Image (cartoon, rainbow, N blue to C red):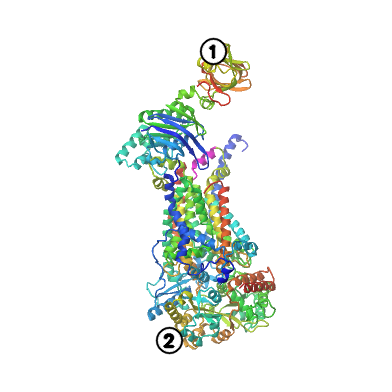
Amino acid sequence: MAGIRFESVGKKYSNGFHAVKDLNLDIRDKEFLVLLGPSGCGKSTTLNMIAGLEEVSDGRLLFDDQMVNYMPPHRRDVAMVFQSYALYPHKTVFDNIAFGLQMRKVPREETARRVQDAADKLEISHLLDRRPSQLSGGQRQRVALGRAMVRNPAVFLMDEPLSNLDAALRISMRAEIKDLHHAMQTTFVYVTHDQAEALTLADRIVVMKDGVVQQIGTPDDIYERPQNTFVASFLGNPPINYIDGAVEVSDGETVSFVRGDLKLKFAGETARKLASSNGREIRLGIRAEDVDETRSSGEDSLIRGKVNSVLPVGSDQFLGFDFCGEELFFRVGKDLDHALGENVALSVDLSRLHVFDKASGASLIW
Amino acid sequence: MAADKDNGDQEMSGLLKSNFGRRDFLRTSAAAGAVALAAPARIGFAQGGPTINMQTWSAAVDTVQSHVNAFTEATGIPVNYGNAPWAQYRESMVTKFVGGAPLDMMWVSDAWLPEWAEAGWISPVDEFDFLMAYNAEAEDFCTNSMTYNGRQYGLTYYTDFMAFLYDESKIKEAGFDAPPATWEEVVEQSLVMKEKGISDYPMMLAMAQESWLIEFMSALVFSHGGRFVDDDGMAVMQEKDKGAVEALQWVVDAVNTHGIVSPACVETGELSGLKAFASGNHAFAMVAKYRLRMLNDPEQSQIAGNVKQAMMPKGPNGDHNTVGWMRFHGMASQAAQDKARAESTAKLIEWFGGKANGAYTFQKFLFLDIGAGFGVKPLFDDPEIRAAYDAYGNVDMIQAQQALAMKKDVVTPWFGEWNETNGSAWQSAILGNTDAATAVMKSAEFWDELKQDY
Amino acid sequence: MRRLFGYEERSAAIFLAPVLAVLMGVAVFPILYSFYLSFFRIKLTRPNRTPFVGLDNYLDLFTNDLFWVSVARTVTFSVVSVAAILAISLLVSLLLNQNFRGRRVLSTILLVPWAIPYVANALMWKWIYDSGYGALNGILYQLDFIDKYMVWLGDQDKTIFLIANAFVWKEVPLATILLLVSLKAIPSDLYQAARVDGAGVWQRFIHVTLPAMKPGFMLVLIYETMMAIRHFDLFFILTEGGPGNASHVLSWHIYVETFRNLSFGSGAAMSYVLALVTFALSYTFIRSLGRKV
Amino acid sequence: MSDVPSSSTQVVDYRRRQRLARIAQRLIIFGGSILLAVYVIAPVTWLVSSSVQTEAEIVSVPPHWIPEEPTLRNFKAIFSATEEETVTYETRSGQDPAAGGFIPSTASSLLPAMANSLTVATLVVILNLLVAVPAAYSLAKIRTWGRNATVYFILITRVIPDIALVVPFFLVIRKLGMLDTIGSLVLTYLAVTVPFSVFILLQYFEGLPDELDKAARVDGCSRFQALIRVFLPLSLPSLVAVVLFTFLTSWNEFLLALMFTQTEASQTLPILLAAFTSDFTISFSFINAAGVLAIIPPVIVAIIFERYIVSGLTAGAVKG
């Protein structure tokens, strides 16, 4: 164990809500898979289906080629960490962690040893006699992790485990979870709506929206090669900028994006893919960080506008930028100094442009 | 039944009778998904067999139990004796009859006789000659009260009548040397007492909605020379001078004009009234004669020793009449259908309502223990009885009043239904919501309607 | 693909089996049986004439004046007592949710009315309300609130409210306990959060306490409404519907119709009207408070 | 005050306002407690006081709040129950006034009736818990078809007035051969109390986080184990509410007991109390004494259990 396979899986609730539609997904053994999407996209439902907490309505769910559609959770070898931690308020920390082992009839000494081990690793050994109500948020989080860890499960499920922590703790816990994955050498399925978490932790990311998978791929794939505007928008901070316009092919080989005065020349592969699309209405995506003031590669890469706002964020600054009445946000170096209302020209990294169909939002180049 | 079928009516034959069959039940309950039918077999009382089921209201329980035990010892017939509170007795018996509970002998109030007989719950006992023999020594009033459609349904358990009692010390304090003889004099004496501050409400009347109400109303009506219903069962209560209007008008005036009866009388039950009288709040009271004993007991009464009985005051057309009532030992129809059970039940009825071991044992105990009146004349000559009576009452007065006690004239199969409406009507008049004539008229109309309906 | 009886359905079936068995075995037959009776004209004193009359028993109610009087009385009684019970038990449960010395003693005292059997309760109040020697008159007279003994239950304008008082007195403990249970489930950090947000006592009550008490509140509302609408014992022992028809409530009307008039058919029909109203009210409460039971 | 800087005035004001608020709060609590206690306890005090008065004193006008000649005779009559099996003419309570004979002849049946009531109530409580807990858990946490229908079905069984059900209940009990047995009361009380027990537990279980249930099941609990190992320990307040509710409902019930019982073998306390009011000889003080005794067992039960509700041992931590 354990490879998990979804074959055309659907989940429909009795009130008619279709939470997950026709899901096909292969989760590989020992993989760290992140389900990413806004709330209500079906990611938690998918996780619950793996756990057996929600029954599959359509299709088949397989663990190592064995269909588990009807297997109740306590017969599946999975462990889960919940957003609210769901610690048992009436049990001590020790009993909370040991509970899963007790239920599986692990011998007492073995249980004690494993609980102690996990507690040591998580640095909560001194808390074992306390009750959850006496713990801080971070401590509770660790107990919840410990409870899942001791089980040595075939699949480790996490449902937004970090969202109740404060920012600093969240970052450090990310690292610990990553370490945990390395140490445990088991399959992790992790649900989050936080792109940063997804990008840091995942081997692969599944982006979902309204119960439908938008894209499956490595963090790099997802970030660099989004297959539609939804995926592209969901990742990136500040989010990707869009400019609607048209493709213009001149001389049979120069392929550009044209919008009024703005003309950006596509490079390499992109240009080749769009060579036959002269006049096509497209939506151009420029990631916030893909501009530069210092580099100057000629008129065909410049975008001009007026500075609307300047937001320093420590290492960089965000530049609010008025382009023909549309507000764009770019991330630029912090040593740049612009006054509000100043007209500036930024140079766009032409090799990193994203092109989407204006109507469907689907990528035209990936 | 056949006629109804011809009319196309759907019959629910026997649904509400005791023979609601096992199969009916199983069918219905199986449809309802019944479980638990396999519950342990009967733990409760034995059905059929030699055991006789006797049901009474919860009165004189110990006395009854001792007499039951003596019966079993004498005859070898085991008796299953159960009891339920008087106030709910009729309802609980209705449920038991309808639900088919095993019943052989039970106490019956004279007011329910037509109803229970019509419903087929109780059966006449006049085929048992050894029971009928006791009629010779019984008060005719009692025998009449147990007779419906010419059949006799049991033997007397106890009988009593509504008595007019007064607190002698208050009368003297007010300056009178004799109790009132007419209702008018009641008003006169009361007004004097009120004026002298002897009592706020000298006359105690209990007019609350309860089973006693009909007896209080009947006593008032009869003493005014009126009737609710004539001998043919037609309503005459609404008619002037021979109906119930005068009596009700007297009460209305007493409450609202003279203020000699408390307006609270509409919430005062027999028991509360009795206790209020015992607390010395009132000078006159209309209560059951057997209450005399309690009222003259210093343990229970603050006016003990002063309570005397007078003849029921009379109205302009009346003659000191009062109402009497009786309760009797009756036989359930299910017992009557089984010869052996009927025989045993009749023996038990005799044991209680006739003689046990050659004497009126139960009646005597009942009187000695709690003062309940007996319906068998010879006991009046019993020295023990006379001695007991003399301790708190006047035997001659009692006998004189008893002779003027009349049966309730409204006892019919529809009595229960009419009684509710009539009681409300009287209360409405006392509360001033309507005048006496209208109230009685309404009651009379309802009577005729029910009679016709029947 | 979905199975009708998966693990969840099987678990649910097993867990619900006992309660369904009890209700099916004991309650369903009586309900269907009395419903069946409501379509017949049954007068027990006429055992051989019990024709099927269809909806007549129900239709007759529309022309039965006393029935409508009883409906009005029931509404008065229920509204007054349920409102009082809710108000008092809300205050008391908030009080008992505070930490103060003597709380245990107070809460134990509070449970006493609940512990008195209804019969004893009714007899006690009858005794208290008695116009001749009752304690209520006694205390009011001694405190100089009245200069002569008053008529209580015998006053048709007061009767129903006095009975409601006896009812409220008895029901408040249960309502309080139920509300207290739901108060206990409010996490204290919710209060702290609200306080940090600058919410005053009153705002905290409106925005934190009340919403959290909603399920308990609803339970109390439904339960007490059902109890009030169907209440019987006090009317039976205190007034038997009197004086006049001042306390002639629907449950008493049904009792009279069934056991005094021995009209089982129309009695059953009235019961089903009452049942329908009760159910409709419960359903509305459940819906309007926005939550399934 | 005028020379104090304005900012400092404000500080002082704040502190004082806080202190005033605290005093006001205390006053409200104190006043409320007193008012409540008086409202609740006054009628009961009168009940107790009158139970030790003589029958003559009890009807005094105005009432004697403190008995002038207190007597325990009523209680003695109840507790001096004879052990004898059969009553004979000689041993019957002759009800001779001189011997305080106005005490009802059934006085000695009061303790057996209390024992019956206690047995019935205890059994009903236990059965309620056994039946209602799994049902409520299932309705609260297992989402399956038929769930809502079940809730409404349970509700519907309680909307029909008991009066309409008395006779058919009687038929069921008779067919089960349980007339005049304690079992008849246990069974019917169970049926009339269990719907609300389910609702009390249901609303509480629904308040417990779903994730707790999920965590338990992922940890390896079957549905049953999740209920027993995780939910039950957390539901103490609601379980206590159910215990009290069912115990007291059974303890109080009158109508069904009236119909199904008829002998000392099964008669419960309320029936005896009602019977005392309709004997030939009636003693209010005795009835009040019986009423006082009737309160004691439930109050003991309440004292045992109420702290679990009022102090909420575990509940506060559930959502924290």
Magenta span of residues: C185-196
Measuring from the top left, give residue D93's x and y in whole percent: 43, 76
Residue type pointed to by label 1 = Thr
Residue B92 vs residue A125, the one in the foreground: B92
Q: Dominant secondary structure of the magenta stretch?
A: helix
> Residue D264, relative to residue A15: is it above or below?
below
Residue type pointed to by label 2 = Gly
Q: Residues within 10 Å of mark 2 (few under 14, many from 20)?
A: few
Residue on which the image places disc 1: A294
Asked if one can make out residue C104 in the rendered structure from this viewpoint, the answer is yes
Dot 1: chain letter:
A
Measuring from the top left, give residue A210's x and y in whole percent: 52, 33
Residue D98 vs residue A25, the one in the foreground: A25
> Residue C117, relative to residue A298: is it above or below?
below
Locate the N terminus of chain B and report the quarter of the image it occupies.
Answer: bottom right
Measuring from the top left, give residue B35's x and y in whole percent: 43, 58
Residue on which the image places disc 2: B358
Q: Secondary structure at mark 1?
A: loop
Q: Quadrant of residue C267?
A: bottom right
Q: Are marks 2 and 1 on the same chain?
A: no
Q: Secondary structure at mark 2?
A: loop
Locate the C terminus of chain B and report the quarter of the image it occupies.
Answer: bottom right
Q: Residues within 10 Å of mark 1 (few under 14, many from 20)?
A: few
